[in-house]
Image: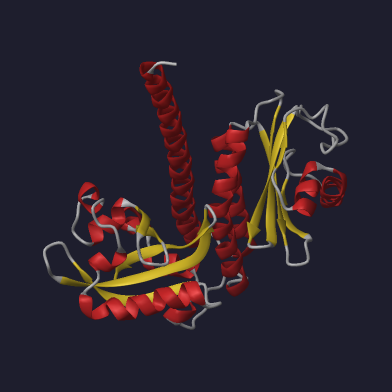
């Protein structure tokens, strides 16, 4: 083999490697865009609904996004409580009588794909339902299913929900689609968990007259207090690693500190936009969130505006995992 041929092979391998990295980055971007959309939707939802209605609306939005990402034709979602029992469900066939609904859910969790996913805590990809014994065809099923993708929504080792996506053509869901949904599931669990926390603290439509202390706020409470509809466009959404480096920021973060979104790309760490007198304070809060059981971040600090002036900034967030790495996902706003 000549040097020229060897060089061509190396270039082909390098090109293939670059194409794979681009695909991985695109998948990550899609997952982050999904999180952004869910956050904005949930902010509006929490202002217009409370209790189980708010929770169900959030679950429907999660399912709607999953359908769009995979081009699924039908879908279902089971929300599980701490004992593994179904506490809320959205069925592909729509609204049915309660007794029938309970019977259908029981059958699926006993002998169906969602049950297999629930027991094994792993994604279930069915390329052809006729050839896969994990798929259960329900009685009087009003749709045709030939391929399916069932995704566990887990918080650590705890299974919180199972989403099942369906299509009438075999082989519709690919391994790439499965990988995308698995990554997006890491974002969806954050939204679902905070919706559950909100319902727990606001079980009825009546609003509490007692003010909530900042250190006790969860992400939904923060969103409710800090983001009326007219301020949604300026909301600063961020993701940081344990050393303060930004993994993601939306244009709202740049605007708070006086930057254009393009200019803000050069800002690599949250500590670059914090007044030096507040570095230790913010670092302490970040470390507490990452290194202790307290998974919520809540602090106020002096920010460094692009023009050199100091601004009062509030930071809220929740510790979660993104692609297996611990991160804090949250909101920055003017105090």
Q: Nearer the viewer, residue 246 or 230?
A: 246
Q: Identify the residue at horizontal 38%, vertical 79% (top origin).
A: 284
Numbered label tally: 0
Against 133, is 153 above or below? below
Q: In this view, which residue lies farthest toward the left?
A: 307
Relative horizontal placement of residue 234, taking residue 285 as reference (left or right): left
Residue 103 percent coordinates (x, y): 87, 49
- The quadrant of the rendering that contains the N terminus is top left
Relative horizontal placement of residue 329, taking residue 140 as reference (left or right): left
**Colour approach in the figure:** secondary structure
Q: Quadrant of residue 113?
A: top right
Relative horizontal placement of residue 212, taking residue 226 as reference (left or right): right
Q: Is residue 61 visible?
A: no
Q: Identify the residue at horizontal 45%, vertical 28% (top origin).
A: 13
Q: Nearer the viewer, residue 1 or 26?
A: 1
Residue 253 percent coordinates (x, y): 29, 58
Q: Is residue 101 visible?
A: yes
Residue 254 percent coordinates (x, y): 25, 56
Q: Identify the residue at horizontal 72%, vertical 39% (top origin).
A: 92
- The quadrant of the rendering that contains the C terminus is bottom left
Against 108, is 80 above or below? below
Q: Identify the residue at horizontal 36%, vertical 17% (top origin).
A: 4
Q: Nearer the viewer, residue 123 or 225?
A: 123
Relative horizontal placement of residue 192, taking residue 32 as reference (left or right): right
């Amino acid at each position: 083999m000549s040097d020229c041929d060897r060089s061509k092979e190396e270039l082909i391998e390098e090109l293939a490697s670059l194409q794979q990295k681009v695909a991985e980055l695109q998948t990550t971007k899609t997952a982050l865009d999904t999180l952004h959309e869910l956050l904005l939707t949930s902010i509006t939802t929490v202002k217009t609904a409370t209790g189980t209605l708010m929770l169900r609306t959030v679950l429907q939005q999660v399912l709607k996004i999953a359908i769009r990402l995979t081009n699924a034709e039908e879908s279902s979602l089971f929300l599980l409580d701490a004992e593994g029992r179904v506490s809320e469900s959205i069925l592909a066939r729509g609204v049915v009588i309660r007794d029938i609904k309970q019977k259908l859910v029981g059958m699926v969790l006993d002998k169906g794909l969602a049950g297999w996913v629930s027991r094994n805590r792993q994604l279930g990809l069915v390329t052809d339902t006729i050839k896969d014994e994990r798929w259960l065809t329900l009685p009087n099923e009003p749709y045709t299913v030939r391929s399916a993708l069932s995704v566990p929504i887990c918080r650590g080792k705890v299974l919180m929900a199972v989403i099942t996506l369906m299509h009438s053509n075999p082989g519709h869901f690919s391994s790439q689609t499965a990988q995308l949904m698995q990554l997006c599931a890491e974002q969806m669990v954050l939204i679902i968990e905070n919706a559950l926390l909100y319902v727990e603290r606001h079980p009825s439509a009546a609003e509490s007259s007692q003010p909530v202390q900042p250190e006790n706020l969860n992400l939904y409470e923060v969103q409710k207090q800090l983001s009326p509809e007219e301020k949604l466009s300026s909301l600063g959404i961020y993701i940081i690693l344990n050393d303060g480096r930004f993994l993601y920021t939306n244009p709202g973060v740049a605007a708070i500190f006086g930057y254009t979104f393009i200019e803000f790309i050069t800002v690599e760490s949250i500590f670059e936009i914090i007044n030096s007198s507040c570095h230790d304070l913010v670092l302490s809060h970040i470390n507490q969130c990452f290194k202790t059981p307290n998974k919520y971040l809540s602090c106020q600090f002096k920010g460094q505006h692009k023009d050199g002036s100091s601004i009062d900034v509030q930071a809220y967030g929740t510790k979660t995992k993104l692609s297996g790495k611990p991160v804090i996902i949250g909101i920055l706003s003017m105090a």
